[in-house]
Image (spheres, helix red, strand yellow):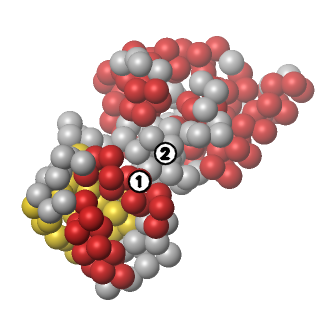
Amino acid sequence: MALATLTDADGRTAESLIRDLERLRGVPCAGCQAPLSPHAVLMSIALGFKDAPRCLPCLAEALDRDAATLRDSLAGYLRQRDCYWAAWQWANRDAGLPDNAPTSESDQRVLRTAGVVHPNGRDTSNRPRATAAWDAGSTACGELVLELRLRLEALAPGAVFQLTARDPGAPEDLPAWCRLTGHALVWQDHPTYLIQRKI
């Protein structure tokens, strides 16, 4: 839907939404820290998570909903609101996708390509590639973060490091450590974590 075909109010709202999508593109998910696509940001805005945008699985978790059902409801909602639909189509063009909104299970590939579905244990199609790796085994958190800090310092800024950490506290400790140190946890599926060194 072209912005020129919208009513004045919807056109202004669509322009505002698109500015938000441009500004928030690539920000980390408030839940899992994965970089967000404009599609995920738009879904977050539609659900009232503009100040803490999330990927679709984290939105579903925050709302205690099934991700596929939430996706389908959101797709229907976005289609009904001209301003949101125009912003969705802008996000599709930005990602090099067709102007249609995924509405069924068969459209999972489109959502993955758009970065809406966060990679997890069921899908690793857009998992970042690591330039270095370390299997920390069941090393406890204190020793693990000290060694991890040294290993990350040896990498170039922006490099992705793969950590295997079997400590039961790792799923909570590593995201918190990354937030505190400025490194980005770009992918996790315990016991595997991908951490991008801060720039």
Residue 5 or residue 122, whichever sits in front: 122
Instruction: Measure the alpha-carbon separation of dots 1 and 2.
Output: 13 Å
Q: Secondary structure at mark 1?
A: helix
N-terminal of the two: label 1 or label 2?
2
Horizontal side of 140 relative to 39 (left or right) equals: left
Q: Position of residue 149 (x, y in %)?
A: 33, 75
x 36%, y 18%: residue? 66
Q: Position of residue 175 (x, y in %)?
A: 38, 53
- Circle 2 Cα neighbour tier, 10 Å, few/some/many (<14 / 14–19 / ≥20): many
Give the residue at mark 2: 29
Give the residue at mark 1: 176
Q: Is residue 173 above or below residue 20?
A: below
Q: Secondary structure at mark 2?
A: loop
Residue 106 visible, this angle: yes
- Circle 1 Cα neighbour tier, 10 Å, few/some/many (<14 / 14–19 / ≥20): few
Q: Position of residue 115 (x, y in %)?
A: 43, 44
Residue 193 or residue 122, whichever sits in front: 193
